[in-house]
Image (spheres, coloured by chain):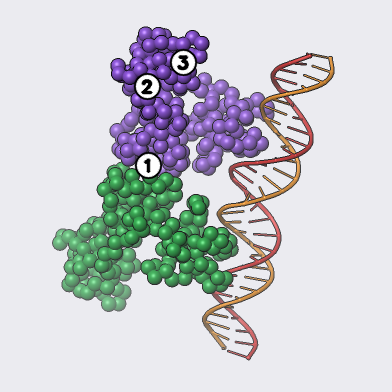
Chain colours: A purple, B green, C orange, D red
Amino acid sequence: MIQTTSEENYLKTIFHHAGISNNAVTTNDIAASLGTKAASVTEMLKKLSAQKLIRYKKYNGVTLTDSGTKQALLIVRKHRLWEYFLVEKLKFSWDEIHEVAEQLEHIQSETLVERLDSFLEHPRFDPHGDPIPDKKGLIKKSDSQKLIDVTEKKEAIVNLVTDQPELLRYLSKIGISIGSKLKVMEKNSFDQSMLLLINGKNKVLISSSIANNISVQL
Amino acid sequence: MIQTTSEENYLKTIFHHAGISNNAVTTNDIAASLGTKAASVTEMLKKLSAQKLIRYKKYNGVTLTDSGTKQALLIVRKHRLWEYFLVEKLKFSWDEIHEVAEQLEHIQSETLVERLDSFLEHPRFDPHGDPIPDKKGLIKKSDSQKLIDVTEKKEAIVNLVTDQPELLRYLSKIGISIGSKLKVMEKNSFDQSMLLLINGKNKVLISSSIANNISVQL
DNA sequence: ATATAAATTTAGGCAAACCTAAAAAATAAT
DNA sequence: ATTATTTTTTAGGTTTGCCTAAATTTATAT
Ligand SMILES: [Mn+2]
Ligand SMILES: [Mn+2]
Ligand SMILES: [Mn+2]
Ligand SMILES: [Mn+2]
């Protein structure tokens, strides 16, 4: 069965909230993410449940079924492939792509996804470091930890950042991108801010909320 | 103002029916093209008229305003650029692309269109030979005539075919593509069928309905 | 245990884009 | 010039996806 754009957005949101262990996701969380109201969410949950894409019991949140997970993974795959395309082929910057990918991910054509994947030579990560599910929905998970948890004096390589335009523009400004080498010079134990040495050149102080949105590999 | 996908499809349909001289287009013609009913068309015409994208007088058909024409040209531009992309970069065949382009043409992002155009190196014609409007909406019109009107013994180069999947597959099968050299060996005056020599090699008989959907340059 | 607060669902509406059937206008045929 | 046919519009419905306000359930605090 073919999903509407709206249904796809709900599935994707549930997927992102559920995490790897497919935890139950609440009505309010979905509403907040999609910018809709709880009442609208309840309505949609009934539809998705009728299609057996989610398991829904009143007042108990929802989890994706296998079928729902498969659909969600395909949407995520398309989103990230398009983001990769926009950056690598069309020279968009990493803060300009999310909104366009939000539209492109709903284009219906299996052939298109697979040809795009081939054309891009099967990229494994999108421009923000998020893994791109393969055709079967398998995700390559790299061992990665939050920058905020890295101890003083350690060095690490940036491999994932949160896909939020304002954050991304800020990171670009201070010279942090995927692959940047960071050395944690000082950690302020009061506010969790960090003094970083970026690529052995610039020293920059970042707040904890920034550090919370960067993941690295030691 | 931003148009819905449905509004864009109406504008494009009106544009295609109006021809270069922007003739009035009838309600029924629009309905037939879009696979909707006349009543639905009337409803939409009121909306487009309120937005001053068309000139609409009850019972008198519609014409596009300058603003409506501009919008329609942009959609056509996007449709054809995407078709070119699908064929040249993703290796789709010319009969597989229309449906996907129908979806892609509605992606909203001015940057995307212009970057795509650059990436493709500003193609002037889509895979069916249809001209791609430039950023300003200008169309390069090549002097071209219908194959059906070519006189016996003349030679001509195919430069435009109708974008209909079944036709396109048939043309591929008999070896006709954009750029093919055709020599009109015989014209049957009874049914207008034509015997062609294709690229100096194969002799093929085509019916008038095929010949009507091929344009050539002498 | 009860009261209060928060989360969720239900009830009733709205706009977009479609539909069918009936009415009105324009066109064609006698 | 009437009548018949075709085209177009109007009237009244439906579905999808959203909303607000009220009711219900669950969670939290006294
Ligand atoms: Mn994104
Ligand atoms: Mn991303
Ligand atoms: Mn096309
Ligand atoms: Mn075309």
Q: Which residue corresponds to mark 3?
A: A193
The CA distance from mark 3 to mark 2 is 20 Å
Q: Amino acid at mark 2?
A: Asn
Q: Is residue B27 left or right of residue A111?
A: right
| Label 2 sits on residue | A159
Q: Which residue is mark 1?
A: A112
The amino acid beneath tag 3 is Ser
Q: CA distance from mark 3 to mark 1?
A: 44 Å
**Residue B125, image x and y in percent?**
29, 56
Q: Nearer the viewer, residue A201 or A13?
A: A201
- Residue under the point 54% across and 24% down: A18
Q: Earlier in the sequence, mark 2 or mark 1?
A: 1
Nearer-N-terminus badge (3/1): 1
Q: Is disc 1 on the same chain as disc 2?
A: yes
Residue A206 on image: x %, y %: 43, 19
- Helix, strand or loop at disc 2? strand
Amino acid type, residue under disc 1 in the picture: Leu
Picture quadrant of residue C10: top right
Q: Is label 3 in a helix, a strand or a loop?
A: loop
Give the foreground label among 3 and 2.
Answer: 3
The answer to whether tags 3 and 2 share a subunit is yes
Q: Is residue A165 above or below residue B191?
A: above
Label 2: chain letter: A
Marks 2/1: CA–CA distance:
28 Å
**Given the image, what chain letter belongs to the residue carrying mark 1?**
A
User: Tag 1, which secondary structure?
Assistant: helix
For the residues beneath circles 3 and 1, the answer to whether they share a chain is: yes
The residue under the point 54% across, 29% down is A14
Q: Earlier in the sequence, mark 3 or mark 2?
A: 2
Residue B165: x, y in percent?
36, 55
Q: Please state which of the two labelled residues, at mark 3 or mark 1, is closer to the viewer.
A: 3
